Amino acid sequence: MLTMAMERAERFDRTIKARNLRECLGAVLLTAIFAFIAWNSPNALARAGNVVVAASGLWILFCMLRYGREAPSPAPDRSVVDFQQALLRKYDHQIRLLKNVKYWYLLSPYVGLMLASAGIVKADIAKGRPAWPQLIAVAIYTALFGFIWWLNEGPGVTKLRRERARLLEEMKPAGGEVGGRD
């Protein structure tokens, strides 16, 4: 039982570590790309929006490094219950993180993209070009950000809650109940 609990906690930690690494690399790439785009922006509004997106990459990097994972698992000499309780805390932490993704992950780059788009529309109108292509881009950004939001708060949280409930069920002594928060 203890070996299984340790392996489960280690597997969860590896999954979170891999996700955090991907997100951190993506945030660094986001910062670099949008800093370059800001340098070549057509006007101050578009430049400000691209700088906001670039800065949001740094913010995401900070959040992932600071809040991306829960405390490490207990020492191997601890009990099965200690490992299970630690895993419950990790599930709770990741659920909170995913439920707040709209604030710490999506809001600032979305605002930056909307500012940059407004700057591009302004530049296009000044040059006598139609603004509708940029409006299509805004619709695509909005759909993509909405999908990411749904993916995290919908299936992502649901999966973690299901795993948490399964763990709680395994922790129940015969005929007893184990409490836990969600």
Image (spheres, rainbow, N blue to C red):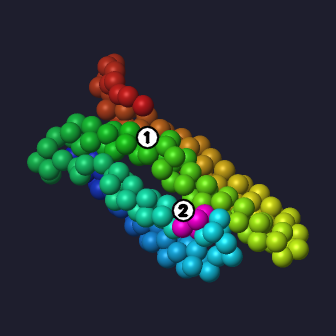
Q: Amino acid at mark 1?
A: Arg
Please give the label number shown on residue 52: 2
Q: Is residue 66 magenta?
A: no
Q: Quadrant of residue 110?
A: bottom right
Question: Residue at the spot x=22%, y=36% of the render?
Answer: 81
Judged left or right of residue 90, residue 107 is right
Q: Main secondary structure of the magenta part?
A: helix
Residue closest to the eye, 178 or 28 = 28
Q: Is residue 156 visible?
A: no
Q: How many neighbours does mark 1 have within 10 angstroms: few (below 14), some (14-19), or many (20 or more)?
A: some
Question: Residue at the spot x=18%, y=47% of the render?
Answer: 74
Question: Could you tell me which quadrant the C terminus lies in?
Answer: top left
Q: Is residue 52 visible?
A: yes
The image position of residue 165, as x and y in percent, is: 43, 34
The image position of residue 6, as x and y in percent, is: 25, 51
Secondary structure of residue under mark 2: helix
Judged left or right of residue 148, residue 28 is left
Comparing labels 1 and 2, the label whose residue is closer to the camera? 2
Judged left or right of residue 44, residue 132 is right
The image position of residue 133, as x and y in percent, is: 83, 68
Q: Is residue 156 above or below residue 117?
A: above
Residue range of the region highlighted in magenta in the rendering: 48-53
Please give the label number shown on residue 147: none
Question: Could you tell me which quadrant the N terminus lies in?
Answer: top left
Q: Quadrant of residue 170?
A: top left
Please give the label number shown on residue 96: 1
Q: Is residue 157 above or below residue 7?
A: above
The image position of residue 113, as x and y in percent, is: 64, 62
Earlier-in-chain disc, 1 versus 2: 2
